[in-house]
Image (spheres, rainbow, N blue to C red):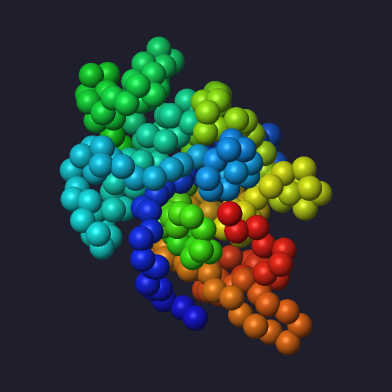
């Protein structure tokens, strides 16, 4: 099962950002994870990458049309959403030029929390968007019959030097820098909760090891939409994804997969 898979109806366009932070020489880099608030309708209490839905302001900032099916234009708006959501949720700015200083970043975050237009805030700060700093990595659209179904584009980026993640305290209750393998180990031990798409992406990142390898593989594999499906096998029912998207694990028993 390969190639582009149609999205189920009524999906919500979204974007998420996988931020890399270099560790000690020879050690694998950390990635930034956030813990979603326990009262959230989707993935409550789970560790995820920063991100959220694409809103009309992201299209305005990207100069695109939010028409359904406008794939290239939605990609442009998704980059803006990933940049904006990361500022909102953890107070880290990527994809802006020049890189904002601490007071400017604080004003951006306060303005976004108050509902101000992102493009207007950037213009007032004398900044410009630099969405090419984000590398498209994957696109997931799980149809798990949850209340909300998200069509989420994943991007990679390097974290600014000295970046400190400060959770917003509402949607995001904690932030953690750790290696992908450490997060998987914590999840397997029951210390963290991760949903099926997050687990598959952490496994892929752990296998790749560095930002440069992850970015190189991402550029070599078209990030077509991944819609997991259920497959009946002799021993059990399995939740599966395509085998040609760079993921080292492409199936998990359905009864063990956390889906929302």
Residue at the farthest right position: 189
Nearer to us in this view, 37 or 25: 37
Q: Residue at x 34, y 45 (%)?
A: 54
Question: In the figure, 176 relative to 149: above or below?
Answer: above
Question: In the figure, 206 relative to 108: above or below?
Answer: below
Residue 4, image x, y percentages = 39, 73
Marks counted in the figure total 0
Q: Residue at x 52, y 58 (%)?
A: 146
Q: Quadrant of residue 229?
A: bottom right
Q: Quadrant of residue 28?
A: top right
Q: Residue at x 36, y 41 (%)?
A: 81
Residue 138 shows in the view: no
**Left-right relation of 249 to 63:** right
In the picture, the quarter occupied by the C terminus is bottom right
Residue 212 shows in the view: yes
Q: Residue at x 28, y 25 (%)?
A: 116
Residue 22, image x, y percentages = 60, 36
Residue at the farthest bottom position: 234
**Left-right relation of 72 to 248:** left
Nearer to us in this view, 46 or 126: 46
Residue 185, image x, y percentages = 76, 49
Residue 208, image x, y percentages = 61, 56
**Left-right relation of 110 to 186:** left
């Amino acid at each position: 099962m390969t190639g582009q898979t149609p999205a189920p109806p009524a999906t919500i366009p979204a974007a998420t950002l996988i931020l890399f932070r270099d560790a000690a020489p020879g050690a694998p880099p950390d990635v930034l994870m956030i813990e979603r608030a326990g009262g959230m309708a989707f993935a409550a209490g789970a560790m995820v990458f920063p991100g959220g839905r694409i809103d009309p302001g992201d299209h305005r900032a990207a100069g695109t049309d939010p028409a359904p099916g406008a794939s290239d234009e939605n990609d442009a708006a998704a980059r803006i959403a990933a940049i904006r959501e990361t500022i909102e949720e953890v107070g880290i700015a990527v994809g802006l030029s020049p890189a904002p200083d601490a007071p400017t970043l604080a004003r951006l975050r306060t303005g976004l929390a108050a509902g101000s237009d992102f493009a207007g805030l950037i213009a007032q700060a004398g900044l410009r968007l630099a969405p090419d700093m984000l590398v498209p990595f994957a696109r997931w659209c799980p149809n798990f019959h949850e209340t909300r179904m998200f069509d989420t584009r994943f991007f990679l980026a390097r974290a600014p030097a000295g970046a400190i993640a400060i959770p917003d305290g509402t949607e995001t209750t904690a932030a953690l820098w750790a290696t992908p393998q450490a997060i998987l180990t914590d999840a397997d031990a029951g210390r963290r909760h991760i949903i099926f798409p997050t687990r598959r992406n952490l496994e892929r990142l752990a296998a790749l090891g560095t930002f440069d390898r992850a970015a190189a593989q991402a550029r070599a594999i078209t990030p077509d939409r991944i819609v997991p499906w259920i497959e009946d096998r002799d021993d059990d029912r399995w939740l599966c994804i395509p085998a040609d998207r760079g993921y080292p694990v492409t199936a998990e028993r359905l009864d063990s997969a956390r889906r929302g």
